[in-house]
Amino acid sequence: MKSNIFTAKRPFSTSHSSVDSEEIKKFQLLAHKWWDEEGEYAALHSMNDIRVPFIRDTLLSMSSNYQLGNPLSGIKILDVGCGGGLLSEPLGRLGASVTGIDPVEDNIRTADRHKSFDPVLAERIQYKSSSLEEIVEDSMETFDVIVASEVVEHVADLEMFIKCCSQVLKPEGSLFITTINKTQLSYVLGIVVAEKIMGIVPEGTHEWEKFVPPEELERLLESNGFSVRSMKGMLYNPLSGSWSWVQSTSLNYALHAVRAGAPPQPHATDTLPETDVQQHSATAGTAGTVPDSAV
């Protein structure tokens, strides 16, 4: 549903393009339509009604230190595949410091232009035309939160994408993903009905082969140092133009995962031979502590 195509052919390399030029051409045609709430991205606009509270409430439940009116103040969020800024802006209004990246330059121009109308957002949000892996080297363990909403179904190398998320996320940071399950039902409703019959999203937006089953996504996350904390189904009603939470994940679903914390630092007695510990203790003063240089 979203125009974010990361191929990750050369991970962590900035000297080669990491995006599919043909896909970029396709989505550039719609770059000026992001903020048309009745247009091709209407379903993404209405998704904010449930995905923004999901992100906000999950983060607030993990911390008691927040400001009324700006509950996400002090939190650094990376919006991967930000498009025209549909999700970046409401997160910025909640007080977060948001970095939005997207490989389609016209999307970034649209996002920059739209945020410029609000001086508060202009200070809180910055956009960059880039793929995820292109920013890894300069953004190691930089962000408290990553959001990848309607993105992973467009990724060519999903495992590499998850690894990059782990690289730029701080220990114990949160990753939020919304995407489409790979089922017969999702093919019928997500492609045949939504694209070909009703035109809810532009035809050709999705490839069913790239849809991601939740069990596969959870396996990839856990194998790359994440712990999945919650997962729930999402359902879009084209008649009302609204989203709702449902128990079934057979169509769309959202999940929250947390990156594992930093490994505990080894104690001096775990790294020094017993005789060395005794010698250091004898010279460290009456407290018998080991100097920092010995660790």
Image (spheres, rainbow, N blue to C red):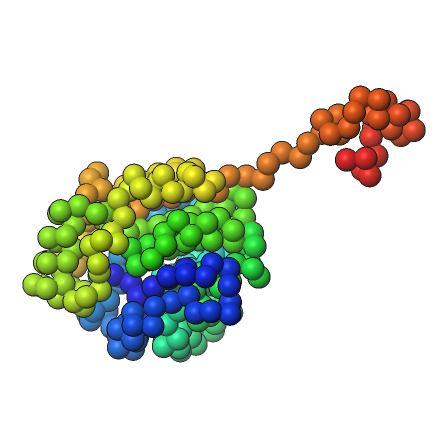
Residue 53 or residue 40, whichever sits in front: 40
Residue drawn at x 19%, y 43% as measured from the top left: 250
Residue drawn at x 47%, y 58% as measured from the top left: 11
Q: Does residue 192 appear left or right of residue 269 in this picture?
A: left
Q: How many marks?
A: 0
Q: Does residue 132 appear left or right of residue 20 in this picture?
A: right
Q: Is residue 68 above or below residue 1?
A: above
Kindly tell me whether residue 211 is visible in this rendering.
yes
* Position in image of residue 53 (x %, y %): 34, 50
Question: Which part of the image, by quadrant, shows the C terminus?
Answer: top right
Kindly tell me whether residue 240 is visible in this rendering.
no
Question: Which part of the image, by quadrant, shows the N terminus?
Answer: bottom left
Residue 246 image-quadrant placement: top left
* Position in image of residue 147 (x %, y %): 40, 54
Query: Residue furthest toward the left?
Result: 197
Q: Does residue 277 appear left or right of residue 170 in this picture?
A: right
Residue 129 or residue 59, whichever sits in front: 129
Residue drawn at x 29%, y 39% as measured from the top left: 215
* Position in image of residue 116 (x %, y %): 43, 76
Q: Is residue 176 above or below residue 238?
A: above
* Position in image of residue 70 (x %, y %): 47, 56
Residue drawn at x 21%, y 58% as measured from the top left: 207
